[in-house]
Amino acid sequence: MERKAIMINTPISELYELRRAINNVDLALATMLAYRADLSRRAQAVKTLAGLPKLDPQREAEIAFRYDSIAPGSVAIAASILHYCRDNHEQAPLQNPNCSRN
């Protein structure tokens, strides 16, 4: 006679699974943020070589609009990401673990 495992989904086990999923999302977000900062640093280097201004308010507004259209109310998050990337232009380039050419 075959016995089937009975899965009991308690609030504690559900909380554990939710936290595990949140940790995975946090890892993905942090990885993508590091990669975005590297892309931003590289774009800044190209702008410097081309004699373009360091800041592009229209581009930043487009980014904020895009964030807000995807996740309403996330304009502050977009602003924080832009600020983070600007502050990290001086750091060494980061590797994107999802891209074999870095």
Image (cartoon, grey):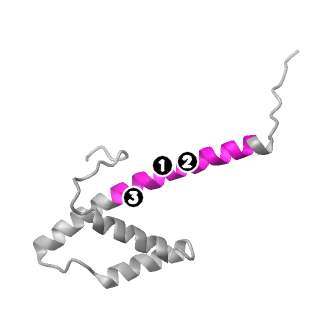
Density class for disc 3 (Cα within 10 Å; few <14, some 14-19, many ≥20) is: some
Task: State whether residue 94 is above or below residue 75.
Answer: above
Q: Counting residues from the N terminus, which is met first, the one under dot 1 or under dot 3? A: 1
Q: Which residue is mark 1?
A: 27
Expressed as whole percent of the image width and height from the top left, the position of residue 50 reads 12, 75
Residue 23 circle label: 2
Can residue 21 be found in the magenta stretch? yes
The image quadrant of residue 2 is top right
**What type is the residue that disc 3 sits on?**
Leu
At mark 1, the secondary structure is helix
**What type is the residue that disc 1 sits on?**
Leu
Magenta stretch, residue numbers = 13-36
Q: Residue at x 36, y 45 (%)?
A: 97
Q: CB atoms at circles 2 and 1 under 8 Å apart?
A: yes
Can residue 15 be found in the magenta stretch? yes
Whole-Å distance between the Cαs marked 1 and 3? 10 Å
Density class for disc 1 (Cα within 10 Å; few <14, some 14-19, many ≥20) is: few
Expressed as whole percent of the image width and height from the top left, the position of residue 30 reads 43, 53
- Spot the residue most to the bottom: 58
At mark 3, the secondary structure is helix
Expressed as whole percent of the image width and height from the top left, the position of residue 10 reads 80, 41
Q: Residue at x 24, y 63 (%)?
A: 89
Expressed as whole percent of the image width and height from the top left, the position of residue 64 reads 44, 77
Q: Residue at x 32, y 61 (%)?
A: 37
Could you tell me how many numbered marks the image carries? 3
Q: Which residue is mark 3?
A: 33
